[in-house]
Image: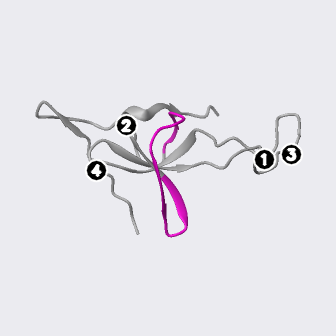
Amino acid sequence: MKLSPLGDRVVLKQLEAEETTKSGIILAGTAQEKPQEAEVVSVGPGAVVDGKTVPMEVKEGQKVIYSKYAGTEVKLDGEEYIIVKQSDILAVVEYSK
């Protein structure tokens, strides 16, 4: 099954939380903070403002940082997703080589 967002919405799949700290301490599941980093799974066509289509700035497969309390969590086929507005995405993460 595929989620196809409407308007300027984006479907995200949250990345796994770190299980150890930089110093090597293993964190219990309840102590782990949900990361605000996710992968873009699907992108809507864009919003229409004053009769003009506002293009989407993110693409499928990109890693992004999103607002902490943004979006709606949904569960589909055993997978958890977050649907957010494009404006709730704060940055695109690009790893340097």
Give the SS element for disc 2. helix
Image quarter for residue 20? top right
Give the SS element for disc 3. loop
Inter-mark Cα distance, 4 to 1:
34 Å
Tag 2: residue type?
Gln
Give the SS element for disc 4. loop
Tag 3: residue type?
Ile
Inter-mark Cα distance, 3 to 4:
40 Å
Inter-mark Cα distance, 1 to 3:
6 Å
Q: Are marks 4 and 1 in contact (CB under 8 Å)?
A: no
Inter-mark Cα distance, 3 to 2:
34 Å
Tag 4: residue type?
Leu
Q: Is residue 23 above or below residue 29?
A: above
Q: Main secondary structure of the magenta part?
A: strand
Q: Which residues are magenta?
A: 62-81
Residue depicted at x 41% and y 69%: 1
As drawn, the label of residue 86 is: 2
